[in-house]
Amino acid sequence: MPDDAPSELLSRRHQMFPVLTEAEIARIRRFGTVRHYRRGERLFAVGQPGPGMFVVLKGIVSISQRDGLGHVVPIVHQGPGHFLAEVGTLSGRPALVDGHAEEDVETLLVLPGQLRALIIAEADLGERLVRALILRRVALIEAGHSGPVLIGQPQSPDVLRLQNFLRRNGQPHHVVDASGDVDAAALMEQYGAAVGEALVVCPDGSVLLNPSADTLARCIGMVDTGQRDELFDVAVVGAGPAGLAMAVYAASEGLHVVVLDCRAFGGQAGASARIENYLGFPTGISGQALAGRAYVQAQKFGAEMLIPAQVVSLDCTRQRTEGVLAIGLADGRRLKSRTVVIASGARYRRPAVPRLGDFEGRGVWYWASAIEAKMCAQTEVALVGGGNSAGQAAVFLAQHAAKVFMLVRGPSLAASMSRYLIDRIEATPNIALLPHTELTRLHGDAPSGLAGVTWRDHRDGTEQERSLRNVFLFVGAEPETSWLEGCGVAVDSHGFVLTGAAVPRATDMPSPASLESSVPGVFAVGDVRAGSVKRVGGAIGEGASAVAQIHAALAAVTRRDAAAG
């Protein structure tokens, strides 16, 4: 592990790099095959698909980090009894580190599918393996010596956009300020990057100028771009808490599951700085940490993750005759599944404030992560919203900003926020709650970013202008259901999916299951479902509950097909 790794990770080094006993290696042998490598040979390389987990039987393997600029940082030397893998190994993702044989080496190679089988079959050993895989990924992220290199101004909108995408997806990366690095500045000039633009150097040396998130994901091997012809049991659209819960429970019960999301795992909950009222976490847990654990857990049971992948359509024409639903992706591919779970959640609502689009990513934010908090250090910020997400963000930002002005349209927070958060806000001296207040104007020019805001008190119409460079918007969300058009899935007047008894139907037709939509085999869970409780715990509960209903739907199709045959 690099010398600059956080002390907390150093204290858990024994968990990160445990040494397997001979008895434990013997238990692993039935899942792997023996492979030999001569001195100097490479076992795996940064940016290339990882072959699986290696258990070192004889010899020494050196592990090092390498970024797209060719910078190499040694991590550790692994000898007999050590295993070589990290979280991405579970699904055969590209390696994030290099592994070379320091001398002639004998290993036991466990392929990704067999690694998942090992973790499930050998529960106690599997627990140690998974813990080590997670800690190793965290160490790689914290060290910042591997993955893509983002070159540009650290606070430019494009650098922040890409940095947020990589952080939300748990991908190691680091930022190089071109103004303080001669080599980085030369690269910017060579590729014609203007001031404020972002240049990305992928681990394989490919260079991208202001790439989209999808383009960057493909460059670093995050997504599978091959054609998928198999028939899934369950396709989950959305990797927020509800979708991840569905994936974990469905995959653990042997169903063939694929999860798709256009942005990152975790959904809006993944951007929460701290969730304190979720069962089992008395000290609280960040949305990113909670989602990250579920993401790994789902893969452990064999769920496939296609993130980012933009779903654009749902074709239900073959559902009644063949029991097959088809999902269309933005890249032209189609996935077939016996059931589909709508867990696409909601997109951030944009208030009707003039010039809002000019400042998105330039001082206007819809989330509050460590990246934005760093930008707000010892400055004043405004936050709009009165729900739990707004409260969590306000408390988090108050730890960094000099003052947080919290704008709420109603008279108080009581009707929309949990009591523990209200108490926390009232006890935080640098949070100023402004009830009956709304944001009315934004000031500044787009290239330079936000320079100030104006808000109005509804009670007397008075306005106040404030010079500040960051405003955070948590004003609710709208259902992400446009991709359902043409399939016949019934929604309410606001676009939320109707399920169960709420589905309009003829009097002689039976009601769908409680989480089933108007289209048989299509279910809805979480925030996208009409009548759902808009809380993390509620979303997870619905995701878990829907699995039993999916089993019933699949069994009904099987009985129907048997009767027809």
Image (cartoon, grey):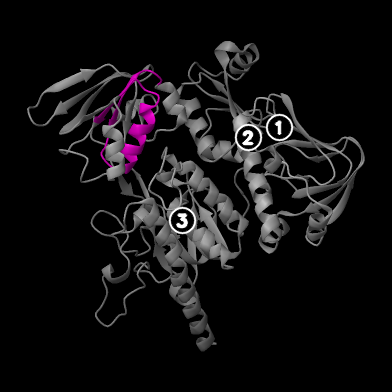
Residue sitting at 54 percent across and 49 percent down?
Answer: 293
Quadrant location, the C terminus: bottom right
Find residue 72 and report its image quarter. Answer: top right
> Which labelled disc corresponds to residue 9?
2
Amino acid type, label 1: Met
Residue pointed to by mark 1: 1
Residue pointed to by mark 3: 243
- Which one is earlier in the sequence, the residue at label 2 or at label 1? 1
Count of numbered labels shown in the rendering: 3
Amino acid type, label 2: Leu
* 517 up-or-down from 460: above or below: below
Residue 284 colored in magenta in the image? no
Foreground label between 2 and 1 = 2
Quadrant location, the N terminus: top right
**What range of the chain is rendered magenta?**
377-406
Distance, label 2 to label 3, CA atoms, is: 30 Å
Q: Is residue 352 left or right of residue 137?
A: left
Residue 383 colored in magenta in the image? yes
Residue sitting at 35 percent across and 73 percent down?
Answer: 512
Residue sitting at 39 percent across and 51 percent down?
Answer: 536
Mark 2 vs 1: CB contact within 8 A: yes
Q: Is residue 442 left or right of residue 24?
A: left
> Can you give x and y, in whole percent of width and height, for residue 229 in the image?
61, 62
- Which one is earlier in the sequence, the residue at label 3 or at label 1? 1
- Which one is earlier in the sequence, the residue at label 2 or at label 3? 2
Q: Is residue 555 left or right of residue 41?
A: left
Q: Residues within 10 Å of mark 1 (few under 14, many from 20)?
A: many
Distance, label 3 to label 1, CA atoms, is: 34 Å
Find residue 361 and report its image quarter. Answer: top left
Distance, label 2 to label 1, CA atoms, is: 9 Å
Amino acid type, label 3: Gly
